[in-house]
């Protein structure tokens, strides 16, 4: 994304989104990159996010959530170097029902006041189909095009883009766990934090895992020794026991595990389960699969039925025209995510830096205007 407008003042980026926290996932690293270079950045949220789920009851109630999330937005933007933050007075969850002409007029007013060099908003798919995201994308695009003739030269309009990744969190986590010198056990809140992080990462296509939370009754074999390894487990509640069958027919108890501990990582790395894991009481786990589990999976070391189906992932829409390397600002991006405490009560350092680089080291956009001219010469 080359900011091309020549002006005496620093170049100016404007992000227009639907909710607090959208700014981080759509363009958090990009905002940090350009503000570090001296650009100005402005973020406007159409709502205060008061209809969001409260994921940390210690920081907000339903009555206070809108004000809390606006404050979180300001804190996150400060981390990213954003100069100005504002929220419009639309209610969360209602943007698709708002008179489109009114919403467009409000966005036109913002564009006129800010006079940006670059405008960033959601793509037409709203990242993952959220109606508010789609509505603000359509309104911002329409407002931009309606005032385009009055801008000389016009600003650039970019839609944020989330291409489908081939990266598996399952594999990255498994290799990290196997390489540790001591067996990992997450601190209080780690399981919740990773669950939220994994869900958001897969929703936004940073990773392609199928994520599922499952409950298991007492006395059930969660995995069996010798079977192909497809999934990684993180215990959310309850206790399990790892058992290994010996050649002489005896069984050795290897360890007991509880909340915040993983199992199955060695199988993922080596391709086969080297021990069985049995639930000792009611157990809930977060599972990472490389694809959607089938409805007809069988168990055992000699089974031939597939347990995972890795089919077509669907249409990603237009290809990205612009890729921004934000790898030097990953820490700021993750800290900004964590600043949205009511939605993402995560610890910025809960995962290795290299894994975060793999997941979020690049941000992608589609340039809507000015359009990129079609090529007529491969060597031109």
Image (cartoon, helix red, strand yellow):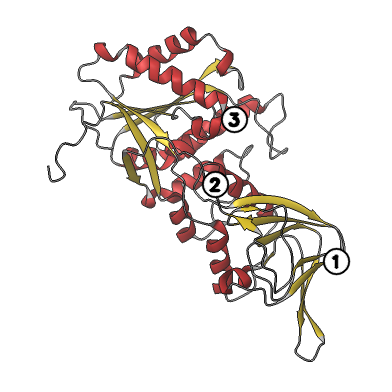
Q: Position of residue 49 (x, y in %)?
A: 60, 26
Residue 40 in picture, x, y percent from top left: 33, 31
In the displayed structure, 313 sits above or below 247; it is above
Residue position for label 3: 69
Marks 1/2 in contact by CB < 8 Å: the verdict is: no
Q: Residue at x 75, y 89 (%)?
A: 247
Seen in the picture, residue 107 relative to 200 is either above or below; the reply is above
Of residues 164 and 342, the one drawn nearer to the viewer in this rendering: 164
In primary-sequence order, the first of circles 2 and 3 is 3
Q: Is residue 373 left or right of residue 65?
A: left
Examine the rendering and report whether any part of residue 18 can be seen.
Answer: no
CB within 8 Å, label 2 to label 3: no
Could you say whether the residue bearing mark 1 is in a helix, strand or loop?
Answer: loop
Q: Residues within 10 Å of mark 2 (few under 14, many from 20)?
A: some
The answer to whether 185 appears left or right of 254 in the picture is left
Q: How many marks?
A: 3
Which residue is found at the position 44% from the left and 12% from the top?
104
Quadrant (top left/top right/bottom left/bottom right) for the C terminus: top left
Residue with the mark numbered 2: 201
The residue beneath circle 1 is 280
Counting other residues with Cα less than 10 Å from the Cα at mark 3, is it few (<14), some (14-19), or many (20 or more)?
many
The residue at 43%/39% (across/down) is: 28
Q: Residue at x 66, y 28 (%)?
A: 65
């Amino acid at each position: 994304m080359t900011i091309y407008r020549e002006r005496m003042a620093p170049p100016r980026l404007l992000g227009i989104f639907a909710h607090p926290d959208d700014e981080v996932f759509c363009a958090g690293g990009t905002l940090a990159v350009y503000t570090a270079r001296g650009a100005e950045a402005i973020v406007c949220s159409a709502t205060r996010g008061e209809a969001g789920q409260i994921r940390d009851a210690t920081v907000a109630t339903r009555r206070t959530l809108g004000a809390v999330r606006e404050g979180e937005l300001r804190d996150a933007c400060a981390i990213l170097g954003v100069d100005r933050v504002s929220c419009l007075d639309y209610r969360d969850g209602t943007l698709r029902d708002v008179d489109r002409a009114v919403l467009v007029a409000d966005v036109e007013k913002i564009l006129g006041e800010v006079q940006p060099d670059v405008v960033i908003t959601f793509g037409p798919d709203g990242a993952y189909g959220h109606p508010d995201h789609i509505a603000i994308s359509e309104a911002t695009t329409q407002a931009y095009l309606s005032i385009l003739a009055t801008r000389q030269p016009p600003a650039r309009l970019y839609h944020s883009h989330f291409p489908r990744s081939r990266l598996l969190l399952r594999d990255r986590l498994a290799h990290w766990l196997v390489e540790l010198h001591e067996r990992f056990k997450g601190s209080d809140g780690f399981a919740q934090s990773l669950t939220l992080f994994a869900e958001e990462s897969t929703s936004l296509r940073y990773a392609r895992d199928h994520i599922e939370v499952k409950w298991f009754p007492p006395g059930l074999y969660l995995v069996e020794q010798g079977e192909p390894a497809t999934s990684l487990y993180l215990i959310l509640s309850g206790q399990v026991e790892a058992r290994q069958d010996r050649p002489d027919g005896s069984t050795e108890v290897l360890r007991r595990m509880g909340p915040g501990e993983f199992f199955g990582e060695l199988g993922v790395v080596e391709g086969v389960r080297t021990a069985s894991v049995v639930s000792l009481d009611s157990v809930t786990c977060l599972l990472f699969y490389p694809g959607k589990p089938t409805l007809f999976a069988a168990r055992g070391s000699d089974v031939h039925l597939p347990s995972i189906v890795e089919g077509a992932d669907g249409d990603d829409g237009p290809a990205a025209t612009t890729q921004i390397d934000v790898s030097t600002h990953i820490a700021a991006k993750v800290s900004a995510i964590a600043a949205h405490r009511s939605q993402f009560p995560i610890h910025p350092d809960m995962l290795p830096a290299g894994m975060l680089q793999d997941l979020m080291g690049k941000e992608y956009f589609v340039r809507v205007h000015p359009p990129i001219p079609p090529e007529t010469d491969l060597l031109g």
